[in-house]
């Protein structure tokens, strides 16, 4: 525990706190504060440089970036990024009919534009957003399903790849958030019955692994329905992940609700607002602001959790990649392929957390 | 502004819910045939990737022996073999999928057994493929027969009859083995190919496909000789819907009988003019076999014309020209010493 | 909470029927009854549908299958099991495997997580940055991807014939990690018993020293006595049995290795995946815990000339643990739940075995119910223990 920092960086004596700390002082206090620290720094730096050199050597200098011939890759000592170039279509689009992949590209463009627009405060206006979402959802539906305008019909069982991951994720958040809010309110409700129902529901689902919920969604849920009624499997799975997500999110939101001072409720009651008015206009907006960082964490977790569908055989980006890695010619380059998938997840996760940090800044500055 | 967002989100959630309710479809409870006709396509549960039996190509087009039997049912029901939607099912999902009505018929390498027939609530059509447990091994390991496998690590899929057969084969011979049980077929094959296991065990008929498509050099691998268990693969339907069961059963017999009568995909049009009353009845020129089953009278004509008789189907996927060439062994007509015996269509 | 009994001040006798109907408490009651009835009806409806669907298709129901013979083998078993045992026992084997891989995962995740967490608040800028990068990477890659990745890495290791030899002590191959182990000896059972006894003795001794200190104010350093109490008895038993020191070295024979112990590739891949994933979260928990102790307290402790070890032991740790333990426990529980992805890689855990059982018997509802109940019990027991701990360490105001 010797290296634990109990002391903030020793600030040089300066009259102007904004003045830059001289580089040497910074180095001394952060890297070479004692003999042991200096030794540690040198060792860590050596290992780091060795590692970076390896990455550079393997990933760039000796790597093969483009070739259709796996033997070229095998001859090289570095990475074979060509496997991603060669196999990007089955990896990104899964089982979706090959000739129709342009529809998925278009769908992803529409999807990303819609999300970016919806996340920018400049466009937070229901008169803009509601039509946008209706148009975007219909367009995505038409593109994905087809069957109209001369597009070939593609059943959900053939959807796959990155678009499927995106849809699962969006569906999870859109279905899960309202359920989460309801469950959180239920757990804090003045009605004992509502409280106990919410508690049992939340705790039971948080106590089991996501896989078992997916098993229920796929194998058991159809038995709950009366004979003859069936619900699309992809939808069942999305709802399953969403409910799981909602139970975790409900606990976060409950934390936010608990942080609201009692005076807020009393003030709302004194101007005779009803329960729902109080909740909607006074309590929830504040509670959601308070627990935004934790909410973001669970939203990012929801994105990672979509990868669990590999167990029930949906062709998301990860499943599609493992399937591609089945090709005997390219099998040996699995590290490159999995790194690529990991980067996709890291990219989206990083984008989400950057956005969340921005929202926190907006909240702090009173912009929203 | 958060408020606006909440409102916007709930609007979208409402929209999603609408979509959800919209996708709730009616699938005839007891009357599968009517439901299939109303839907306009057959939902057929198949193996996700078993070369020779069912596998999608890189463009997502399904082909295989069992896929063709699904298409034969569609040809009988609609007169159009293309009206099938293939639902890829893992070995764990296959029974819940048929039980819950997610698929109309299961043509997914299912071995007909008593407990599946009873406790699982299934009905089995006549077997379309007779096989047994097989072991795929690397030639370099010097394994020549099953008794050489004592102490080996063996890869297999969970919940398969194979899993039980291997336990019995080894127990009977007093040998030990370590099972590695992986559900995901890709991961399973990968485990064998990379050398995690000494042997891969599946239905014997499925193994040449693994060697041909999933290994770098198929010549490095071999099937161990001998047949060690009975694996009659059959199409399965739900219990409690006899007309649908009848149809699936007779589609199977029709492919046998067409081969027996010499009616092939190539000559079916000429055969329609045949004077043989059996052929005439088969192709619906005379009689009302189709009507009795609730489909068009030309149902067998459609099957043979669009998909073929048993031999056509077999040769297309397991013939000597194919990558997964398999001798027909027991899968020949009874008249040639095999086990295929189509009941009379009278 | 909103006060729902605002009109309690009104006189009861003076109330008319309309008053009652319009009163908030009555409305609350109605809502509650409606909700309760609604939930009950929904439950009944679903239950009836299940029963009807199952009986219409003649699907077997009930838990009778647990007593039937399983007829399948399992690759890794901690308790005796063969294909002639029952489904119930097979599931028990799965549960034991789940607990084993989780325990190993927790140990590894804790060691790595604490190291990274401490590095995360280190004075050394370079180390700090590396720790942050590590945390961000392992936390944000889906755990399934990590498990599949490690599985692929291990499978692509050389075959047993070309296995990597580890300094004569073991082999690394695509059959897993095989290593030398002391040959089984009757002494081991007794040594284990002696170890348990030693731990109990040490706890009792420390407790007595604490009582003594509280009563007299005199401090007895118990560190070395406790170490001696824990490791002394097993060592003495070992010597008593004549110090058996045979070691079983693994040798290549036939398909595999003979002798020593082997950890299967599936176990290693699953354990590595879930442990590394959790280690990122644990590192963050540890960081928060360490930063929870106000600097002033440490300075105060130092100013009364408390030895550095005691500053750690009596000032920093108790406060840090109070912050660390609750989230750490829930992280452990989620690691146990994450171990259920074993099915992807083929490690025979509870879900994997349950999956096979579900397949053999066709009783999806019951098999899934068994899995869910087991995990639920694990979660509930853990959270009960946690509540107990929280009450134990809660700041006692005197």
Image: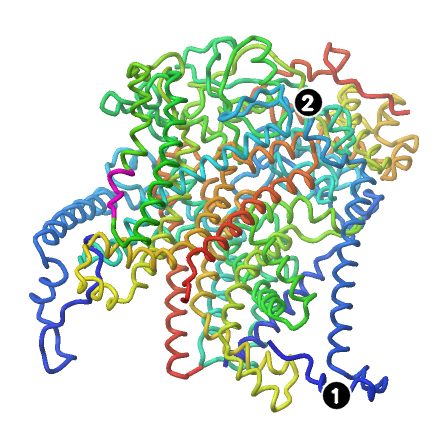
Q: Do labels 2 and 1 share a chain?
A: no
Q: Where is residue C208 in the image (x, y as percent from the top left)?
A: 35, 44
Q: Where is residue A277 in the image (x, y as percent from the top left)?
A: 62, 83
Residue B260 seen in the current view: yes
Q: What element carries label 1?
A: loop
Residue B227 appears in which quarter of the rendering?
top right
Q: Residue B129 carries which label?
A: 2
* Magenta span contains residue C225: yes
Q: Which of A128 and C361 is in front in this view?
A: C361
**The residue marked by circle 2 belongs to what chain?**
B
Q: Is residue A299 above or below residue A83?
A: below
Q: Where is residue C280 in the image (x, y as percent from the top left)?
A: 35, 52
Residue pointed to by mark 1: C10
C150 relative position to C88: left or right: left
User: Which residue lies at the image location 64% right of the left edge and 53% below the top edge?
Assistant: A236
Q: Position of residue C146 (x, y in %)?
A: 40, 44
User: Which residue lies at the image location 65% right of the left edge and 13% below the top edge?
Assistant: B329
Residue A96 seen in the current view: no
Q: What is the magenta range?
A: C220-226
Furthest residue in direction bottom, as rendered: A271
Give the number of marks: 2
A36 relative position to C268: left or right: left
Residue contact at pointers 2 and 1, CB within 8 angstroms: no
């Amino acid at each position: 525990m010797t290296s634990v920092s109990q002391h903030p960086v020793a600030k040089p004596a300066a009259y102007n706190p904004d003045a830059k700390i001289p580089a040497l002082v910074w180095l001394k206090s952060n890297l070479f504060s004692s003999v042991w620290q200096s030794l540690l720094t040198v060792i860590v730096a050596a290992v780091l440089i060795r590692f970076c050199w390896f990455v550079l050597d393997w990933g760039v200098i000796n790597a093969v970036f483009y070739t259709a011939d796996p033997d070229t890759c095998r001859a090289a000592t570095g990475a074979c990024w060509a496997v991603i170039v060669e196999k990007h279509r089955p990896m990104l689009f899964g089982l979706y009919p090959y000739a129709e992949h342009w529809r998925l590209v278009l769908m992803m463009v529409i999807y990303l534009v819609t999300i970016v627009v919806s996340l920018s405060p400049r466009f937070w206006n229901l008169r803009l957003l509601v039509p946008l979402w209706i148009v975007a959802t219909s367009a995505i539906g038409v593109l994905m399903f087809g069957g109209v305008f001369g597009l070939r019909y593609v059943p959900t069982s053939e959807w796959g790849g990155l678009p499927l991951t995106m849809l699962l994720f969006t569906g999870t958040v859109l279905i899960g958030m309202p359920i989460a809010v309801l469950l959180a309110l239920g757990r804090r409700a003045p009605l004992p019955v509502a409280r106990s129902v919410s508690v049992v529901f939340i705790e039971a689902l948080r106590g089991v692994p996501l896989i078992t919920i997916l098993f229920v969604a796929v194998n058991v849920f159809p038995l709950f329905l009366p004979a003859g009624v069936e619900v699309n499997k992809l939808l069942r799975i999305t709802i399953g992940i969403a409910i799981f997500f909602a139970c975790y999110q409900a606990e976060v939101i409950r934390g936010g609700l608990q942080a609201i001072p009692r005076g807020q409720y009393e003030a709302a009651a004194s101007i005779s607002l009803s329960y729902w008015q109080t909740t909607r206009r006074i309590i929830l907006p504040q509670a959601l602001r308070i627990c935004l960082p934790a909410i973001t964490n669970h939203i990012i977790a929801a994105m990672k959790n979509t990868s669990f569908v590999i167990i029930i055989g949906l062709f998301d980006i990860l499943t599609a990649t493992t399937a591609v890695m089945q090709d005997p010619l390219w099998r040996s380059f699995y590290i490159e392929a999995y790194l690529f998938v990991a980067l996709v997840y890291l990219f989206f996760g990083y984008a989400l957390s950057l956005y969340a940090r921005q929202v926190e800044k907006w909240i702090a500055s009173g912009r929203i | 502004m958060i408020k606006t967002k909440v409102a916007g989100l709930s609007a979208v959630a409402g929209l999603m819910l609408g979509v959800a309710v919209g996708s709730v479809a009616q699938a005839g409870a007891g009357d599968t045939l009517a439901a299939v006709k109303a839907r306009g396509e057959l939902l057929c549960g198949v193996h996700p990737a078993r070369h020779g039996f069912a596998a999608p190509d890189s463009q997502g087009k399904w082909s295989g022996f069992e896929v063709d039997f699904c298409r034969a049912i569609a040809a009988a029901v609609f007169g159009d073999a293309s009206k099938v939607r293939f639902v890829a099912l893992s070995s764990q999902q296959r029974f819940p999928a048929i039980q819950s009505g997610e698929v109309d018929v299961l043509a997914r390498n299912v071995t007909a057994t008593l407990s599946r027939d009873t406790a699982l609530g299934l009905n089995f059509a006549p077997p379309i493929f007779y096989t047994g447990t097989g072991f795929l091994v690397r030639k370099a390991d010097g394994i020549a027969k099953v008794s050489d496998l004592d102490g080996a690590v063996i890869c297999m899929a969970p919940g398969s009859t194979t899993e039980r057969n291997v336990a019995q084969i080894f127990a009977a011979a007093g040998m030990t083995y370590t099972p590695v049980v992986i559900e995901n077929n890709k991961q399973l094959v990968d485990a064998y190919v990379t050398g995690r296991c000494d042997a891969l065990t599946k239905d014997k008929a499925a193994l040449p496909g693994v060697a041909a498509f999933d290994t770098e050099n198929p010549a490095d691998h071999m099937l161990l000789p001998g047949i060690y268990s009975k694996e009659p693969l059959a199409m399965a339907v739900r219990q409690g819907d006899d007309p649908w069961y009848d149809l699936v059963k007779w589609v199977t017999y029709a492919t046998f009988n067409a081969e027996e009568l010499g009616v092939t995909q190539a000559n079916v049009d000429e055969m329609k003019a045949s004077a043989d009353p059996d052929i005439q009845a088969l192709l619906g020129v005379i009689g009302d076999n189709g009507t009795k089953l609730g489909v068009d009278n030309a149902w067998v004509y459609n099957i043979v014309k669009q998909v073929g008789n048993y031999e056509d189907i077999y040769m297309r996927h397991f013939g000597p020209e194919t990558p997964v060439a398999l001798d027909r062994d027991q899968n020949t007509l009874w008249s040639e010493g095999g086990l295929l015996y189509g009941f009379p269509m009278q | 909470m909103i006060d729902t009994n605002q009109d309690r001040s009104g006189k009861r006798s003076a109330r008319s029927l309309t008053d009652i109907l319009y009163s908030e408490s009555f409305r609350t009651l109605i809502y509650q009854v409606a909700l309760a009835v609604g939930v009950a009806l929904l439950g009944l409806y679903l239950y009836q549908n299940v029963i009807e669907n199952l009986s219409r298709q003649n699907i077997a129901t009930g838990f009778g299958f647990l007593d039937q013979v399983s007829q399948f083998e399992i690759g890794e078993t901690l308790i005796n099991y063969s294909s002639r045992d029952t489904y119930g026992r097979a599931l028990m084997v799965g549960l034991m495997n789940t607990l084993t891989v989780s325990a190993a995962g927790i140990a590894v995740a804790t060691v790595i997580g604490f190291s990274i967490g401490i590095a995360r608040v280190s004075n050394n800028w370079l180390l700090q940055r590396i720790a942050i990068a590590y945390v961000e990477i392992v936390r944000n890659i889906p755990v399934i991807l990590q498990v599949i990745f490690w599985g692929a890495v291990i499978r692509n290791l050389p075959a047993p014939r070309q296995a990597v030899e580890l300094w004569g002590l073991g082999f690394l191959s695509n059959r897993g990690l095989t290593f030398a182990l002391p040959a089984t000896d009757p002494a081991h059972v007794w040594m284990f018993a002696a170890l348990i006894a030693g731990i109990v003795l040490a706890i009792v001794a420390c407790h007595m020293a604490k009582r003594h200190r509280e009563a007299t104010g005199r401090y007895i350093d118990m560190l070395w006595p406790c170490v001696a109490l824990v490791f002394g008895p097993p060592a003495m038993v070992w010597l008593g049995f004549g110090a058996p020191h045979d070691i079983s070295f693994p040798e290549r024979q036939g398909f595999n290795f003979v002798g020593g112990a082997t950890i299967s590739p599936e176990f290693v891949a699953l354990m590595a995946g879930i442990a590394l994933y959790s280690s990122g979260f644990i590192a963050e928990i540890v960081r928060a815990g360490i930063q929870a102790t106000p600097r002033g307290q440490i300075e105060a402790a130092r100013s009364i000339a408390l030895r550095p070890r005691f500053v750690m032991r009596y000032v920093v740790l108790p406060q840090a643990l109070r912050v660390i333990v609750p989230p750490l426990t829930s992280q452990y529980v989620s690691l146990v739940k994450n171990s259920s992805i074993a099915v992807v890689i083929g490690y025979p855990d509870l879900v994997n075995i349950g999956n096979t059982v579900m397949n053999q018997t066709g009783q999806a509802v019951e098999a899934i119910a068994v899995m869910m109940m087991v995990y639920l019990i694990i979660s509930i027991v853990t959270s009960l223990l946690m509540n107990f701990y929280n009450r134990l360490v809660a700041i006692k105001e005197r």
